Amino acid sequence: MKSIFSRPIAALTVAVVALLSLSSVSAADVSGYLVGYGENAHPRELSHQTRVLLSGGQYSSMITKDGKFTFTNVPQGTYLLEVQSPQYTYPTIKVTLGEKEVKANLVSLGYDWSNNDNPLQLPLTLIPRAPTTYFIPREGFKISSLFANPMMLMMGASVLMLFVLPKLMANMDPEAMEEMQGMQEDMQMPSFEMPDISATLAKFSTGGASSSSSSPQAASGKKRQ
């Protein structure tokens, strides 16, 4: 009777041990620290919204007060480690989990995924490259910007002519002065006299009606004569 129950228990124990051994081989932990920006920066200055991601969010980890992050039971493979921070821009890391060891390499622009240069020590210590900028700083006032404005250039030319033109005309020959004045008079537009609107309306309302009514009477008088 004991042998009947002991065999399934032994088989179950062997299966559990095998699963545990497989899980210990095929999974590993990835940990590291985030550092603030500057010489005297403290991890507590990091935003609580800072997160560390593996492979675009397949695995996610928040940071503790001392800036530590940990990924537990990560299967074997190659992952891209990124830091999402509203304050700083951190480097991107390639993490390779093997059967016996964990490797980390720095990823740069134009990086070949099969390249294993720029190795990093574990646990990782990530230092931000620069603060994150969201807005373009507004340019301050510059005197040179005034000369780039067309309206300011036209105003400056008008003021210059206002002071320079009288001096030029004072030193001009009288004959040339008369000739220029004649040209200015020729260039002037002819002045048209505006009609008197009130007189025109009165003519149309009264005078025009009386003249039209008296004209048939005058014509009939001429016929009688």
Image: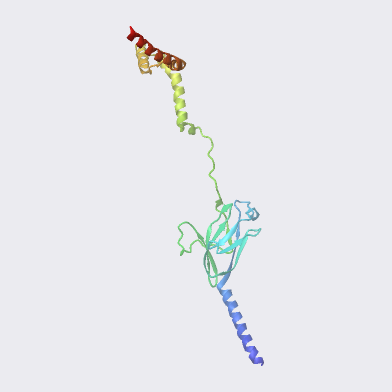
Instruction: Looking at this view, name the residue that lies furthest to the bottom.
Output: 1
Percent across and percent down for residue 22 are: 57, 76
Q: Residue at x 45, y 31 (%)?
A: 150
Q: Who is closer to the viewer here, 216 or 180? A: 216
In the rendered image, which quarter is residue 126 located in? bottom right
Q: Quadrant of the C terminus?
A: top left
* Coordinates of residue 116 in the picture (x, y in percent): 48, 64
How many numbered circles does the render carry?
0
Which residue, as the protein is rendered here, is positioned at the far top?
Answer: 225
Image vertical order of residue 156 relative to residue 101, above or below: above
Residue 216 coordinates in the image, percent (x, y): 37, 13
The spot of residue 74 in percent (x, y) is 57, 68
- The reply, left or right, for residue 174 in relation to residue 99 is left
Q: Compared with residue 134, is residue 11 higher up or lower down, i.e. above or below?
A: below
* Left or right relative to 110: residue 183: left
- Point 32% across, 10% down: residue: 223
Check the picture and name the quadrant holding the N terminus. bottom right
**Residue at the outermost front position:** 224
